Amino acid sequence: MNAFTDRPLAPTNIGNRTFHWGSRTFVMGVLNATPDSFSGDGLAGEIDLAVEQALHFQRDGADIIDIGGESTRPVSLYSGAGPISTEEELARVIPIIEALVPVLDIPISVDTYKAGVADAALDAGAVMINDVWGFRRDPDMVSVAVDSGAPVVLMHNQAHTRYDDLVADVIAQLKSMADDAVTAGVKPENIILDPGMGFGKTAEHNLEILRRLCEFRVLDSPLLVGMSRKSTIGYVLDLPVEERLEGTAATVALSVAYGADIVRVHDVKEMARVAKMSDAVVRGWTQSDA
């Protein structure tokens, strides 16, 4: 059973591009407009560097740039990480989006759970919303999505790691998020779902979700997977964040094999190559693809 051909999905228009799900794996490049990113690549206030990095990502094979202004790493594990005000998040994100819009050919996504930030980011030129709380943190977020018509990534997240049945519970919560969004007026083809690796989950949970990713195809939505540089890789390999490239590559290859439609990564050049090679095996490759 092929993870891609047995569940045809309607394409999604993201900005001026149409994403035909199943044709290949798409790459989302992470651009952190923060001073405290867990991965050590925060670019708060560094607009020129952010533009340079985004352009490198585009050249290296990114299909989407995802810009976030608030670190989502656990407060208990990292000093200084935690919620920031809407005003501060706007100050970090909007100038970068405004600088990128004239120079990028690929869509810009805003990584936020705050409606005010999402609304301003869309006004500035972003065309997609990536909400790590799946519209469950800010009730006004769904109105921003409906009014703008922007595609959305709804991620599973919770404040604890307790589950009755891990995969079944995450699938059920993702389905509930998607159903609520559609009821509110979001077009079904504009919904992308993310199982939320590392959010309300132990390392063992993350590994099990990745191993059973094919089961998430019952959701009939494109799947985004983000394991890049995460602590689960450090847990397995006993390596610091700056030495998790190979571990990330393994998770990207497996994500592609098990049915991911988008992989969210920090190391775009390397992971775009991993995704392309994995696609050649999983989806089939001919000389015309060269």
Image: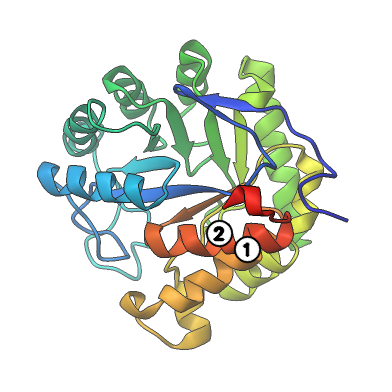
Of residues 285 and 33, the one drawn nearer to the viewer in this rendering: 285
Q: Quadrant of the N terminus?
A: bottom right
Question: Disc 2, disc 1: CB below 8 Å?
Answer: yes
Name the kind of residue labelled 1 in the image: Ser
Image-quadrant location for residue 102: top left
Q: How many marks?
A: 2
Q: Which residue is at 67% across, 42% downward?
A: 23
From the viewer's perspective, tell me whether residue 144 is left or right of residue 185.
left
In the displayed image of the protein, which residue is found farthest to the top? 147
Question: Residue 41 at x, y = what percent?
Answer: 25, 60
Vertical relation: 2 (above or below) 96: below
From the viewer's perspective, tell me whether residue 9 is left or right of residue 71.
right
Label 1 crowding class (10 Å Cα cut-off): few <14, some 14-19, many 20+?
Answer: many
Q: Which residue is at 39% across, 49% downward?
A: 29
Label 2 crowding class (10 Å Cα cut-off): few <14, some 14-19, many 20+?
Answer: many
Question: Residue 180 at x, y = what percent?
Answer: 67, 26
From the viewer's perspective, tell me whether residue 246 is left or right of residue 163.
left
Image-quadrant location for residue 239: bottom left
Vertical relation: 214 (above or below) 185: below
Residue wearing tag 1: 278
Circle 1 — which element? helix
Q: CA distance from mark 2 to mark 1?
A: 5 Å
In the displayed image of the protein, which residue is found farthest to the bottom? 238
Question: Residue 216 at x, y = what percent?
Answer: 75, 50
Question: Residue 140 at x, y = what percent?
Answer: 46, 21
Name the kind of residue labelled 2 in the image: Ala
Q: Which residue is at 22% across, 30% downward?
A: 94
Which of the labelled discs sits on residue 263, or is there none? none
Residue wearing tag 2: 275
Circle 2 — which element? helix
Q: Is residue 165 visible?
A: yes
In the displayed image of the protein, which residue is found farthest to the right? 1
